[in-house]
Amino acid sequence: MSSEINCIALIGKQNNPLYIKNFSNTHPDLKYHYIAHTSIDVIEERVSNGPKNLDLYIGLLYAMEDLAVYGYITNTRVKCVVVVSVTDCVIRDADMKLIFQKVHAAYVNQVCNPFYNLDSQKSLTSKAFIRAIDAIGLTKPTRTTLDI
């Protein structure tokens, strides 16, 4: 079985959407905007109540309908959300961590651009960044089937 990344979203430290990309043909863009913004509350709750470790990967935030929402937060409080379609399979945390590390690396490359304003509330529009996220969105996380 193959799984699909349905959406990748980056949310700024002031909870403003920096980038939301819909890879799904079955759900509208508005649904992923809603999922990205509802995941902010879950991320903030886990970060404030959780142990103060150095792991940036938050893990599974919640599941709704046929989607699983995973979260990641950078040291600069930028939140990354990846929405994956789910069936009767489990996605390994190691694979999700790898996806988030790639998204984080693409964001760091964007931020290192001397012409990028880090405190800007504008969306990310760099062609290199968009190509990097598109390449990540086309990858398929490894799944393990559940024996029921």
Image (spheres, grey):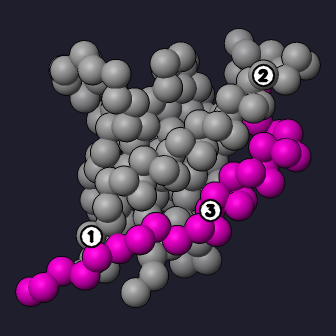
Q: Is residue 85 left or right of residue 100?
A: left
State yes or no: residue 126 in magenta.
Answer: yes
Q: Which mark is drawn over residue 141?
A: none
Part of the protein shown in magenta: 122-148
Query: Which amino acid is tagged 3?
Result: Gly
Callout 2 environment at 10 Å: few (<14), some (14 to 19), or many (20+)?
few
Q: Nearer the viewer, residue 28 or 22?
A: 22
Pointer 2 residue: 112
> Is 60 left, or right, of 105 in this rendering?
left
Q: Residue at x 34, y 22 (%)?
A: 54
Residue found at x 29% / y 50%? 60
65 w.r.t. 37: above or below: below
The CA distance from mark 1 to mark 2 is 35 Å
State which mark lies toward you, 3 or 2. 2
Residue at mark 1: 90
Whether 100 is drawn above or below 84: the answer is: above
Residue 87: x %, y % from top left: 31, 79
